[in-house]
Every structure is written in C-alpha cells, then in structure tokens.
Amino acid sequence: MQTFKLEDMLAYRAVFLAEGLSQSLSQVYKEHLSLSTPEWRIMATIQQKGECRARDVAELTLLDKVKVSRAIQRLVDRGFLLKRQHSTDKRAFFLSLTPLGRESYNDLVPKIQTWQTQIKQGISQEEFDVFSRVLGQLTNNVNGVQR
C-alpha cells in the first residue's frame, strides 16, 4: 500500500507555491507604493481590462466583495482610482485608473518584471513555457470539474 503524503498532493503544492509567490511579490508593491495585495490586484486588473465595474473586479481578482470595496475606497482616497456612477443603476459604478494610478502602475511594472526574472532563475524558457501550458491545462481541468 502506498503512503499518502500531503506534500505530493497537487492542490497542496499549488497553494504552497501560490502563497509563496504572492508573499514575495507583495514585498515589491508594498515597498514601492505601499499597496496591499487586494489594491495591487485591483490596479493590475483595471490596467489590463480598462474601465470596469466593482463586481467585475471582484470576479476577476478572486477577492470577496468586502475586500474589493475597502481596497477600492483606499485607492480612490490615494488618488489612484476614479469612481464613476453608472447612468441607470445608482448602486453600481465604474472604476478606472487616474493618471497618477497609471503612472504608478507603469513605474512598478519594471520592478515586477525584475522580480519575475529572479523567481525564474534556474528555469529555461522552454521549461517555463511547458510549465505555463501545464498550468493552463490544469486550470481548464479544474474549471471543467467544478461545472
């Protein structure tokens, strides 16, 4: 009979890796912009997707609505985000980066790219490409199982 080891479970290893990457990356955006993880995810999402609703941001960042709401307010207070009320639904609003938000994001990107290069040390581009494809397939598999 084979012994069950937690360390061999894909879910355990993936969570362990994701948490380690998240903590390591958070040092970069905390040091340079004093951002929390939710704040960084929100800024990055809006930069990538353009203007979007808070509900969309919550779905895209995998953060709960309360964390998103609080982080949005902090980003608005700091001048990184602009909130524009929806024309027909007064409860909804659209979010976009301000010029300061875009500039801050763009200043941070090279630092994050340097961090990623350091994290990928010892891994060839070919190995990383295979790893990326495997992650994509695992994501598709998980999404298929959840339906």
Image (spheres, grey):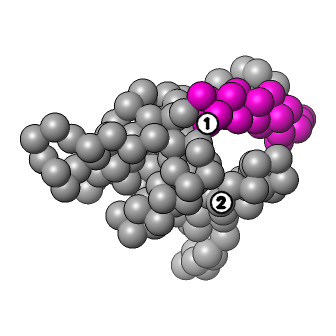
As for residue 113 lying within the magenta part, the answer is: yes
Q: Which residues are magenta?
A: 99-123
Q: Is residue 12 left or right of residue 59?
A: right
Q: Secondary structure at mark 2?
A: loop
Say if residue 82 shows up in the picture: yes
Residue at 76% x, 21% y is 125
- Using the rendered view, name the quadrant where residue 100 is placed: top right
Residue at 72% x, 21% y is 126
- Using the rendered view, name the quadrant where residue 116 is placed: top right
Residue located beneath label 2 in the image: 36
As for residue 5 lying within the magenta part, the answer is: no
Camera-nearest residue between 43 and 91: 91
> Going by the picture, which residue comes out furthest to the top?
126
Residue located beneath label 1 in the image: 101
Residue at 60% x, 28% y is 99
Kind of residue at disc 1: Gly
x%, y% of residue 69? Answer: 41, 62
Badge 2 density bin: few <14, some 14–19, many ≥20, Cα 10 Å = some
x%, y% of residue 142? Answer: 36, 50
